[in-house]
Image: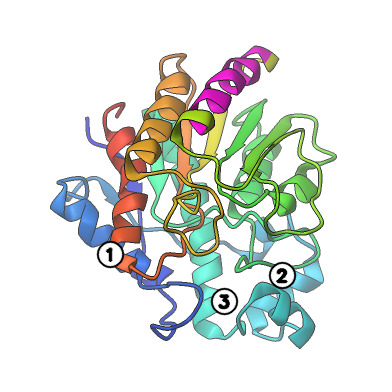
């Protein structure tokens, strides 16, 4: 069986090449996946934009309306990090629809990945930190609301703490949020996850993998998970300009193999999203994101 991948050309909102958020990583990631034979016809699905009613499961109705109408207040746009114009609004709706679709594919096939997503700084009332809508929180709440799942686990290994996901899901006992991140990094004010592991600056492969290996059995011991959302942010890499950790390419591959293997060997469906990555060398960045898909393909 081949890995199910969700992608849309409009995941790229066309930012300038020198923008702090490297939009070109999305088409470059798909090029990298095609070179690796992972994006063959029959394995790709294209999402629809997430409708307002779906987005309102996780976000305040007035904020959802502002994004869809491209009328987000300037103070919130400053926190997000870019203006919410029609392309950005569409991209946010598509990326959320993509994670929703990937989650359904994961429930059907055992594993699937969205070639975007992981917008974990978007909180209930607003976006922040390059995140407009919180795709994983939206998908989690939808699956729970319709009874498709009873217990959801979010494993967030982006270098930045998953404050928005923690905010949205803090009163949902059927969803468990885990974030392992760099302690002295954005956001300055963390919102407590169900489990947070804060790492010191400069943490490298061995220490990172050792800490993660100790936590994964703890998570599996909590309860029987019906789906895992895995945010595989690659901004933990030593060459990432917003990271402060020191993983190598080999460390990233070991991380992906460990996380995906842990849950798939236990029969838990897994939905992967790509999370953050901010290297100036965007082709190298896209190759780092491709490691998630390579590891996932081994369990498809």
> Is residue 261 magenta-colored?
no
Disc 3 secondary structure class: helix
Query: Dot 3 corresponds to which residue?
Result: 89
On the picture, is 93 further left or further right than 261? Answer: right
Callout in the foreground (1, 2):
1
Q: Is residue 104 above or below residue 275?
A: above
Residue visible at 57% across and 76% down in the picture:
89
- Residue 225 in sight from this viewpoint: no
Disc 1 secondary structure class: helix
Magenta stretch prevailing secondary structure: helix
Residue placed furthest toward the front: 202
Q: Is residue 9 above or below residue 294?
A: below
The numbered disc on residue 64 is: 2
Q: CA distance from mark 1 to mark 3?
A: 25 Å
Q: In terms of image quadrants, where is residue 141?
A: top right
On the picture, is 68 further left or further right than 256? Answer: right
Query: Dot 1 corresponds to which residue?
Result: 283
- Placement of the N terminus among the 4 image quadrants: top left
Disc 2 secondary structure class: helix
Query: Does the CB distance between marks 1 and 2 fall below 8 Å?
Result: no
Q: Give the class, few, some or many, for how many residues have Cα within 10 Å of label 2's Cα (few <14, many ≥20).
A: many
Q: Earlier in the sequence, mark 1 or mark 3?
A: 3
- Placement of the C terminus among the 4 image quadrants: top left
Query: Does the CB distance between marks 1 and 3 fall below 8 Å?
Result: no
Q: Give the class, few, some or many, for how many residues have Cα within 10 Å of label 3's Cα (few <14, many ≥20).
A: many
Q: Position of residue 146 (x, y in %)?
A: 65, 37
């Amino acid at each position: 069986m081949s890995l199910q991948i969700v992608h849309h050309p409009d995941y790229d909102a066309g930012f300038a090449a020198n923008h702090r958020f490297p939009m070109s990583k999305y088409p470059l990631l798909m090029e990298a996946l095609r070179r690796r034979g992972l994006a063959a016809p029959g394995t790709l699905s294209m999402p629809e934009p997430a409708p307002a009613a779906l987005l309102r499961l996780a976000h305040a109705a007035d904020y959802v309306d502002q994004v869809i109408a491209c009328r987000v207040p300037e103070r919130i746009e400053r926190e997000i990090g870019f203006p919410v114009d029609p392309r950005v609004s569409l991209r946010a709706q598509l990326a959320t629809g993509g994670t929703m679709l990937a989650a359904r594919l994961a429930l059907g096939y055992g594993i699937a990945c969205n070639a975007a997503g992981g917008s974990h700084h978007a909180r209930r009332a607003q976006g922040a930190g390059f995140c407009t809508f919180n795709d994983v929180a939206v998908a989690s709440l939808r699956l729970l609301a319709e009874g498709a799942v009873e217990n959801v686990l979010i494993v967030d290994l982006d270098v930045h703490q998953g404050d928005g996901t923690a905010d949205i899901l803090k009163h949902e006992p059927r969803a468990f949020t885990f974030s392992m991140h760099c302690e002295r990094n954005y956001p300055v004010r963390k919102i407590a996850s169900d489990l947070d592991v804060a790492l010191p600056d400069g943490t490298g492969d061995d220490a990172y993998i050792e800490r993660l290996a100790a936590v994964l059995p703890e998570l599996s011991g909590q309860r029987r998970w019906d789906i895992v959302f895995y945010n595989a942010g690659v901004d933990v890499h030593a060459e990432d300009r917003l990271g402060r950790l020191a993983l190598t390419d080999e460390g990233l591959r070991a991380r992906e193999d460990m996380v995906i293997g842990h849950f798939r060997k236990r029969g838990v469906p897994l939905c992967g999203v790509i999370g953050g990555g901010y290297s100036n060398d965007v082709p190298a960045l896209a190759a780092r994101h491709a490691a998630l898909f390579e590891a996932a393909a081994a369990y498809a």
